[in-house]
Image (tube, helix red, strand yellow):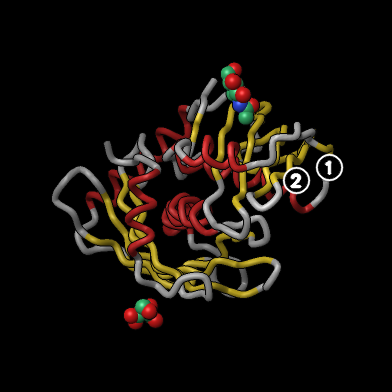
Amino acid sequence: MMKILCLLALLPFTIQAAPSRSQIPSEIPTNSRLARHAAKLALEYLIYQSGSPHQLLEVTDVKRATLLEFPFVGHKYYVEFSAQVFETMENIGLCSASVFFLDKKPRPSISLNCSSTKVQKQARDDDYEFYKMMKAQTSPLTGENIPDSYGNIEPQFEPVWKLAILGSSYVILDKSTEEHEYTMAQIRSVRQIPRKDNFIAFSFDIFLYQRPSEEMVPCNLHVVWAPGRPPKVDHSCQDYTENGSGSKAEEGSASLGNFK
Ligand SMILES: *[C@@H]1O[C@H](CO)[C@@H](O)[C@H](O)[C@H]1NC(C)=O
Ligand SMILES: *[C@@H]1O[C@H](CO)[C@@H](O)[C@H](O)[C@H]1NC(C)=O
């Protein structure tokens, strides 16, 4: 069991700000865009926290979804869903999550319980192998267009692609609103940044795919990682919601509490 509370400090305020008449959550269709969006975001949180590029997860089925509306404040979704490890399709069981979007604001508050959150041994071993290989690199790894325009990824770049997905989970959590969804689409270029400490680091130029606009949003990610912990991610994206100053990323990194 695992319990994650994000932006806890906001909750008392927002709940107080809601009208006092009692609120009744309404059921929404489990196949609706918003139900899936909430479940996917909750899972991004779990992916980020697992810190394992070899145990990326996907939502298989939303079993139940309710919505609680706080007029002028926001919408709180409660979703129950099943999830699996992307690569092995191994079921990780059921999760229940609440996802609270403040009106028009990015970075929803997420709380999540899943029946299993353990990173599997195989994934841990693969993480460590990748880490060791990157540490041993005599010249820093570089690459571009992963996957290429045919959707192919060369085997040597597979783990780098997965690490970029792990890093992007942080950015997606930071940028998503109730209306806007993001998915990792492509690494345009990647460059390893040599480090003398125990971490490995990469600078990624990526495209995030945004819905409903269907735009490709260019972002730069600086990802610092070692096996067994969430990556530290600084990012700047060039879309209309922010203009790439990067100060938000710093703040965000701190609020997720990585790198204790
Ligand atoms: C998670 O579990 C705790 C303790 O059982 C419970 O209080 C909380 O409401 C649960 N959260 C969700 C989102 O299910
Ligand atoms: C972002 O906005 C700030 C403040 O308006 C401005 O100084 C800066 O040049 C902008 N950066 C970009 C990349 O447009």
Name the residue beneath numbered marker 2.
35
Identified at 38% across, 44% down, the residue is 255
Whole-percent x, y for residue 136 in the image: 22, 50
Crowdedness near tag 2: few (<14), some (14–19) or many (≥20) residues, C-alpha within 10 Å: many
Q: Secondary structure at mark 1?
A: loop
Q: Nearer the viewer, residue 24 or 81?
A: 24
Is 14 displayed left or right of 131 in the figure?
right
> In this orientation, which residue lies closer to the viewer: 244 or 168?
244
Q: Camera-side residue: 43 or 195?
A: 43
At horizontal 71% and vertical 49% (from top left) the residue drawn is 71
Could you say where residue 82 lies in the image, as x and y percent from the top left? 71, 33
Sequence-wise first label, 2 or 1: 1
Look at the numbered disc 2 and give the secondary structure of its residue.
helix
Amino acid on which disc 2 is placed: Ala
Q: Amino acid at mark 1?
A: Ile
Q: Residues within 10 Å of mark 1 (few under 14, many from 20)?
A: some
Image quadrant assignment for residue 80: top right
Is 19 left or right of 1, judged from the image as shown? right
In the rendered image of this protein, does residue 203 appear above or below residue 14? below
Camera sees residue 158: no
Mark 2 and mark 1: span between their CA atoms?
7 Å
Which disc is residue 93 wearing?
A: none
Instruction: Give ligand 1's quarter of the image.
Output: top right
Residue 258 position, x and y percent, is 34, 41
The quadrant of the rendering that contains the N terminus is top right
Check whether the beta carbons of the residues at disc 2 and disc 1 lie within 8 A of each other. Answer: yes
The residue under label 1 is 28
Visible residue check, residue 258: yes
Indicate whether 174 appears above or below 88. below
Residue 147 position in % (x across, y down): 54, 66
